[in-house]
Amino acid sequence: MVDKPPHQIDPERFVSDEADRARAVSDFLRDQEERAQGGVRGGLRRERIRRFRRTTVIATWLGIAYIWVGTPGWLTVQPPPPQPIEAESTSLRWNVFLQSQRIESYRLERGRLPYVLDEAGPRFRGMEYHRRNSRTYELTGRSNRVELKYESEQAPHDFVGDAADLAQDIPNREDGK
C-alpha cells in the first residue's frame, strides 16, 4: 500500500510570483522594524519606571531616617500640663470616700470590718487600710503630690468637703444614714 496525501495540493494556489514574494518579505521586515522600535520605546519606558521607583525608595528611606534620628518638633507630642493640686486633692478625697463606703458596706453585710482592704472589694490605686480594732479603721490615700488620711470616727461628709459637689447625697454618720 502506498501512502497518499489526503488531498491533492494545487500548485497554482500556493506558488506566487516574484512581486508577491517581495511584498511579503517587505511586510515581514517592516513588522520586525516596528517591533524593534516598540522594544526600544518599551525599554526606555521600563528604565524610566525603574529610575522613578529607585528615587522613591531612596526618598522614603531618607524620610524615615530623618523622623527616626532627627525627631522633628512637629512630630513630638507634648504631655498635658499637670493637674492642679486642688483638683488632685479633690479626686483623691473622693476616692478615699468611695473606698470607705465599700468598707462600711462590708461591715454592714458581715457584721465586722475586713481584715485586709481587698476583702471589701477592689482597692483604688494608692489606698492603704489599717484596722485599729473591731470597730475603727484608718484609710490613707496617696497620689503623686497629695496624701490624705481618713479615720472611721470622722463623719464622711466632713471629710469629703469640697468634693461633695461630685455627689448629691453623702451619708453622714452622725445622722445614722
Image (cartoon, rainbow, N blue to C red):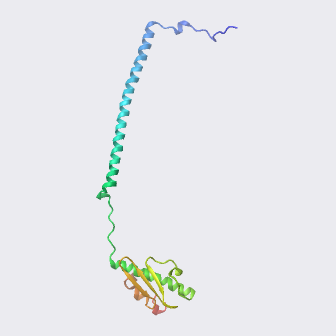
| Res 37 seen here | yes
Q: Residue at x 32, y 48 (%)?
A: 62
Q: Is residue 40 above or below residue 88?
A: above
Quadrant of the image occupied by residue 109: bottom right
Q: Residue at x 43, y 83 (%)?
A: 140
Q: Is residue 27 above or below residue 46?
A: above
- Where's residue 169, x and y in %? 44, 85
Q: Residue at x 36, y 44 (%)?
A: 57
Q: Is residue 44 left or right of residue 122?
A: left
Q: Is residue 110 above or below residue 74?
A: below
Quadrant of the image occupied by residue 3: top right
Q: Is residue 9 above or below residue 55?
A: above
The N terminus lies in quadrant: top right
| Res 168 seen here | no
- Where's residue 142, x and y in %? 40, 79
- Where's residue 105, x and y in %? 52, 84
Quadrant of the image occupied by residue 72: bottom left
Q: Residue at x 35, y 31 (%)?
A: 44
In this orientation, which residue lies closer to the viewer: 144 or 74?
144
